[in-house]
Image (cartoon, grey):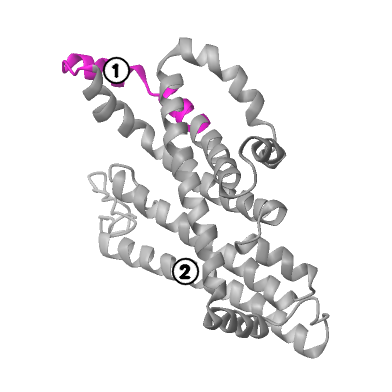
Amino acid sequence: MKGPTATDGRGTPRQDAVFVRRPLRTLDRAAAFQRRRRFLEGGLAVLIPLALFALWELGARLGWIDARMFPAPTTILRTGASLLAEGYFWSDILLTLRRVLIGAGIGIVAGFTAGALMGLNRTARAALEPMLSAVYVVPKLALLPVFITIFGLGEVPLLVIISVTVFFYIWIYTMEAFASIPEGYHEAARSLDLGPVRMFTQVLVPAALPSVFVALRVAISVSIIVIVASEFLVGTTGVGYVIFDSRRLFMNDQMYVGIVTVSLMGVVLSMIVQRIGRLVTPWVKHSRRID
């Protein structure tokens, strides 16, 4: 934006006129703009689902859709409240959550270890990557019969299949994150006379962590999908079993309660991972750019 232009008596710009370019947006205006945009985005994130649920409710009440197959959202809420009040549904929720957390924890540790080793050691990568890549493309549910054959029925095959699922996501993201660290990071660490342990913990791990947390968010979501399917196939407890058993008994309102529970579980776990990632990697700019 140009300031006032100096002119002579006839309105012609003088040769010695000074043009001042002012910033397009002051800091206060930029902050206000960012607040308005966050408010708009948050509002849209809430209003769009509410509008869809309202349309669903209206369609069920007016007979546009078959309420026996697609119960109204208010019916689903009442059924969910009733199940939680009775108490037994809590045990299924906690069992599914426990399986996800234990299995994911094992997979995260194993995947990070393998990814870091193969990302920093070309010999290990050359030796192990072809075999792991071949198993990576196999649908993990296809391995469930193998795990049942090895470990038998019960909790162990469910935990193993989640661990394997999470392992591959963490492994491939971690390996690529460590392998793509610029050589300048290594040179800077050597110039500061850092030993191997300090170089790994203070330079290489912080450089790879942002990609690892992206992998964590993806892996947690996929692990919930896998455990729900596994509970349907071989389980007798858990939210996945409730969903498919309710469908078999034509208790569709209870089935939708299970689906909503799984959805909320995935959202909450993903938000927790995202929050931990922001706390652990404060050097990464998480805020959006002001346009």
View extreme (top): residue: 123
For the residue carrying disc 1, how many other residues have a C-alpha within 10 Å: few (<14), some (14-19), or many (20+)?
some
Q: Nearer the viewer, residue 131 or 272?
A: 131
* Whole-percent x, y for residue 108 in the image: 45, 39
Q: Does label 1 or label 2 sit earlier along the sequence?
A: 2
| Residue at (36% x, 67% y) in the render | 35
Residue identified by numbered label 2: 42
The Cα atoms of the two marked residues, 1 and 2, are separated by 41 Å
View extreme (bottom): residue: 62
If the image is split into quadrants, where does the N terminus sit?
Answer: bottom left
Residue identified by numbered label 1: 186
* Whole-percent x, y for residue 218 in the image: 53, 46
View extreme (left): residue: 193
Magenta span of residues = 172-195
The relative height of residue 157 versus residue 126 in the rendered view (above or below) is below
Badges 1 and 2: C-beta atoms under 8 Å apart? no
| Residue at (58% x, 53% y) in the render | 224
As drawn, is 132 to the left or to the right of 30? right
Residue 179 within the segment the image draws in magenta: yes
